[in-house]
Amino acid sequence: MRKWVALAIAFLLFISFININSKHVSTATNMGNILYVGGDGEGNYSSIQDAINDAQDGDTIIVYPSNYKENIVVYKELKIIGIDYPVIEAGDESRDTVKIIASNCTIESFKITNGENGIKMMDCAHNNIKNCFLYGNNYSGLYLKNAYHVLVMNDIFSDKGIYMKECGRVTISNNNFTNCGIFAEVVSETKITHNSFFNGKDMAIAIHHPTSYENEISYNQIKSFRVGISFGGSGGRIYHNNIVSNDEGILCHGSKYAKSLIYENNLSNNGIGIDLLNIPFDGLEITRNNFVGNELHAGFLDCYFILWHNNYWDDWSIPSPRPIFGRNFWFFPWVQFDWRPLMQLYEWWKNISTPAPAFAAVQIR
């Protein structure tokens, strides 16, 4: 018995010796180990990638303030959290600054810059990008390909925004976009909500491809773009947005398989409020929107039997159907009607508890 006790004590002393003399220190918790990068702690890592390489699935990596000039690849299920926004600057600007190829990952509170893409996420699910500044990247701030159940929240994008392809159930919420936006194709059940888009040259939000379906755009502020929202696919909803001072407010095209809805938006001071292109029979309903101060409130090309009703038009004060002029497939003049136009603003914002964010030109700190 004494022999076994002596062996056990010797083993514990050996393990303690190994831990004390290991190069890097980690803290064990019931949620995995915590590894530290930067700072002045003895045994902390100097490279984020080195910490990733030594970590195990479920670990957390805490990164102290500094400028980390490296391209990192996240290939394990990790939380990587910055303190006071450390900078990850791509060492090789032809590569992605951060590449994520694992699921169940979180990247939080960093400044991410100088890469081909700020963050590239591929073939994964259940990842979070939160509280980050993405700027100074070449192609996009955030690139998503074949990614599902992704949360993008409280981030600031400057000059390069988000590109998504073949993704589903992505939520993009409470972000600021300056001189950039979101471009998505072949996406489903994606929510773009409570974001602010300001001063861009092209499209603030674009969802394209006829197979995109059941996407939702709501509670956004969009100002000073060529197109505020360019929307395709089917079964989508656009509602509770403030769309102001764009060349085109909403451009909707090709809702083929299920009816899409555009309702309770404010469209003001745009070149065209709503422009429709190639919408099939009964493919779209437009209701309870406010059209104010646009050069042309609405137009269409090759669209038939669009359901317009209960919209407010500031150029129409007669309690009778309001005509909407466009052209048919052969470019001959055609007309549709809002059969029950409202005679005063529809104040939808008084009936909601989550107003859209105010416009803000956000600066990189």
Image (tube, helix red, strand yellow):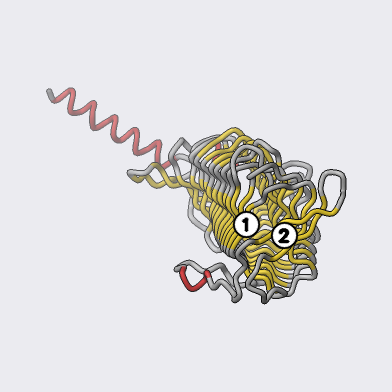
Residue lying farthest to the front in this orientation: 320
Residue drawn where x is 36% and y is 44% of the image: 31
Q: In this view, does 93 lie to the left or right of 67?
A: right
Given residues 21 and 123, the one toward you in this image is 123
Q: In this view, does 262 lie to the left or right of 135?
A: left
The answer to which of marks 2 and 1 sits earlier in the sequence is 2
- Residue 184 percent across, percent down from the top left: 68, 45
Q: In which quarter of the image is residue 131?
A: bottom right
Name the residue that disc number 2 marks.
274
Name the residue that disc number 1 marks.
286
Is the C-beta separation of discs 2 and 1 under 8 Å?
yes
The dot on residue 82 is none
**Residue type highlighted by circle 2:** Ile
Other-residue count near label 1 (Cα within 10 Å), few / some / many at <14 / 14–19 / ≥20: many
The vertical placement of 318 against 1, above or below, is below
- Residue 60 percent across, percent down from the top left: 46, 46
Of helix, strand and loop, which one carries label 2?
A: strand
Of helix, strand and loop, which one carries label 1?
A: strand
The vertical placement of 230 against 56, above or below, is below
Quadrant of the snapshot with the C terminus = bottom right
Q: Can residue 180 be seen in this view?
A: no
